[in-house]
Amino acid sequence: MQSPRLLYRSFQKSLSSSTTLPCNLFAKKKPITLQGRVGNYLVRDVSVTGTMTENKKSLYNVVFVLGGPGAGKGTQCEKIQETFGFQHLSAGELLRQERQAPGSQYGEEIEGHLKNGSIVPVAITCSLLRREMDNSPKNNFLIDGFPRNKDNLDGWNIAMEGVAKVRAVLFFNCPDDVCVDRCMNRGLTSGRTDDNAESLKKRIETYRNSTMPIIEHYRALNLVTEVDGNRSPEQVRLSLTCPLRNFQQFFFLPEQAMCITER
Ligand SMILES: Nc1ncnc2c1ncn2[C@@H]1O[C@H](COP(=O)(O)OP(=O)(O)OP(=O)(O)O)[C@@H](O)[C@H]1O
Ligand SMILES: Nc1ccn([C@@H]2O[C@H](COP(=O)(O)O)[C@@H](O)[C@H]2O)c(=O)n1
C-alpha cells in the first residue's frame, strides 16, 4: 500500500495536470476545501487559510508583485493578503520606513534613490525583506515592488537560496499615462517625495528599462500571471481571485493538512 505522503504527491500531480481547474475550490474557509481520488483512496484536503501558517520555517513561499508605479500593486496586495493567507511586504514601503528610522545609516542613500526613481542596492532591500519574513508568523509572502532590476534579482537569488521559493509573479500591466495620473493624484495626499512629475518620469524609465526585463525573465520561466491593471479596483480584485486560488492550491498546502481516507 502507498504511504499517505506518496498518495499526497500523486494527488498533487494529478491536480497540476488539470487545465480546467474550477476556481471555487477554496471558496469555503472550513472545513473541507478539496477532494479527489487517487486509486482506491479518497483524498481530502482540509487545508484552510489559517492552517497555512503552521508550516512555519520550511521554505518561505513568495509571490512577487510587479508593475509600473501606480499600477495598483499596493492597493490589491492590501485587499488580498488576508483572504489568501499571505503577508504583504512592500519593498518601497520598507525603504521609506528605513529612511525615516532614527540613526539609520542608509537614510540619505535611500532618499537619493527615491527622489531619482533609481533602485537602492539589493543588500539593503533584501535585508529589510528578510527581517520582515523572519519576524512574521506567516510563511507565505506577497512581495510588492521587488525585484526591480538585475541587481535585485541576482542579490535575491544568492541571499534567499534555500530560504525562499518564488512560486509566481503577478504582473500588473497598466498604461504609463494612467499610472502617472494615479501617482500625481496620490501625491496630493501621500506626502511621498517621489509622487511628482519629475520623479515619475524617472520611475517610469526605470520600470521600462530595468524592471520589464525582470518580468520577461520570469515570464520565460512560466511564472508570470498578467493582470490588466487599467480597470476599477474591484474589477482588478475579482480578476485576481482565480489565479490566487490556484496558487494556494498548487503551492501552499502543507502535507500535514491532507486528510486521507480509504474507501
Ligand atoms: N484600479 C485602480 N483604479 C483607479 N485608481 C487606482 C486603482 N488602483 C489603485 N488606484 C489608486 O492609484 C494610486 C496608486 O495605487 P497603488 O499605490 O496601489 O499603486 P502601486 O502600484 O503600489 O504604486 P507604487 O509602486 O508607486 O507604490 C493610489 O492612489 C490608489 O488609490
Ligand atoms: N525593490 C525596490 C523597490 C523600491 N525601490 C525604491 O522605492 C521607490 C518607491 O517604490 P514603490 O514600489 O513604493 O513605488 C522606487 O522608485 C525606488 O526608488 C527600490 O529602490 N527598490
Image (cartoon, grey):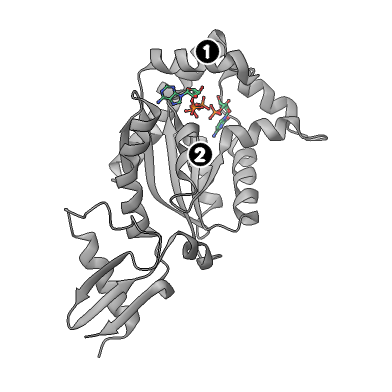
Kindly indicate the quadrant of the structure image that contains residue 101: top right
Horizontal side, residue 185 vs residue 12: left or right: right
Badge 2, how many Cα within 10 Å: few under 14, some, many 20+?
A: some
Q: Nearer the viewer, mark 2 or mark 1?
A: 2
Screen quadrant of the C terminus: bottom left
Which residue does the image show at 57% across and 37% down from the upper left?
91
Q: Which mark is residue 222?
A: none
Q: Which mark is residue 184?
A: 1
Q: Is mark 2 within 8 Å of ligand 1?
A: yes
Q: Which residue is mark 2?
A: 78
- 185 or 127: nearer the viewer: 185
Q: Decide if residue 107 is on the left or right side of residue 59.
A: right
**Where residue 185 appears, x then y in whole percent?**
52, 14
- Single out the residue that lies furthest toward the bottom: 1
Q: Name which residue type carries label 2.
A: Glu
- Image quadrant of ligand 2 equals top right
